[in-house]
Structure formats: C-alpha cells, structure tokens
Image (cartoon, rainbow, N blue to C red):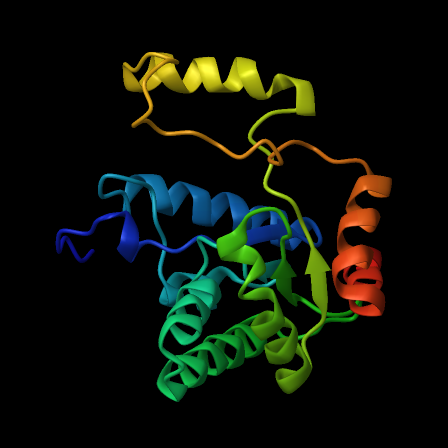
Amino acid sequence: TDKTPMDSKGMRHLILLAENQEGYRNLCKLATISQLEGFYYKPRVDRELLERWGDGLIAINGHLGSELAHHLVEYEKTGHEAHWESALEVCAWHQKVFAPGPKGPRFYVELQHHIHEQNVINPHLIRLAETVGAPLIATNDAHFLRAEDHDAHDTLICISTGKLKSDTDRMTYPTELYVKSPEEMREAFEGAYGETGRVACDN
C-alpha cells in the first residue's frame, strides 16, 4: 500500500517457481495481488505477502536485479562488511520463509555467467551459499530464443525506444542472453567455477 515514489533501483527481482498445486495457487494469488493491490508503476509484492502466500513455492535469488545481488554489488564496490551482513540477512529471511520441504530445498542462491557486473559478484554468491548452507543454481537470462536472434531483438529494442540502430547512445543487450543448451550452460559454468559450477548446473 506504500505509494512512496520508487524508481527501478528500489525494485528487486525474485524468481518464484510452483513446487506443487498449493504453490501454483499461491503463485496465482501473488500475481493477482501484485496487479490489483500492489501495482504502483509496476506490479509488486512485499515480504509480508511472500510470508503469507509462500507455501509450495521455490525462491531463487542472486542475479543482478535481485536483492542479494544489490547488497553484494555494494560489497564489491566498497568492501564494507555491512553490505555482506545485509546479504546474510536476505538469505536468512528467505531460508525461513522458503524452508526445505518434503521434496528438498525451497531456496536457492542463483549464479549467472554472462556479463561482467554479474561475474564479479559470483565468488561472493558462492561464498554466501556456503556460509548459509543454501544450494546454488545456474541460470541464464533469456531475452531472445537463439543466439542468432540477437539482431532481431536489437531492432525491437530500437522500435520500442524510438532509436536508430546507428545511434551509439541507446539501450543494448549482451549477445549472451538467449536460451542456452544444457551443454552450453555446463561449458560456461564448469569452465568458470569447476565442481561448484557442475553442482549448480545439476541443481
């Protein structure tokens, strides 16, 4: 219900997956509330709603737009332990709300490996997961389906933002943001993180 002006820097991403039928119903409930009650420029939910409707859901946190990454980017920049402690608090809250169920873990620390800003915080994410005993999971942002679709996606971005492809000062997306095959994922993560990358891919 808070209508304090909020820019995109104040919003954090969280991946939620339905583990079972109850989780699917709760995911639908959260999506509805986010649009009808939480909407303020964008649909949104808060911790209170996640605590109320979190049963049967799996949470994944760690990519660059997430709350965990926000604190770890600041930690990487400044080295201040307060940012590390904030990341630990985020993990503790998620581990409480998304406690392991009969089928296993319901909170995962996320690793992505495609852009510099993400890659530099990945060692912190790995250390964080080890510290709190949370499993790691490998993911890849996908804004287009195949690697060769990058140019078509780039054209769509130009259309939606009113820019020319020749404009040098415009929004662009990295070429790596496509749906990678399992083999490509394993090559990237095992190559960069060894056994840790293999386990993250397995998860």
Q: Residue at x 67, y 76 (%)?
A: 134
* Left or right: 3 as drawn, with respect to 44: left
* Frontmost residue, 40 versus 70: 70
Q: Residue furthest left?
A: 4
Where residue 88 sits in the image (x, y, percent)? 49, 82
Where, quadrant-wise, is the N terminus in this rendering? Answer: bottom left
Number of marks drawn: 0
Q: Is residue 79 above or below residue 36?
A: below
Q: Is residue 126 above or below residue 44?
A: below
Q: Is residue 118 visible?
A: yes
Where residue 196 sits in the image (x, y, percent)? 79, 68
Q: Is residue 178 above or below residue 186?
A: above
Q: Residue at x 34, y 49 (%)?
A: 44
Q: Is residue 33 above or below residue 152?
A: below
Q: Is residue 52 visible?
A: no
* Left or right: 36 as drawn, with respect to 69: left
Q: Identify the image quadrant of residue 89.
A: bottom left
Where residue 20 sits in the image (x, y, percent)? 71, 52
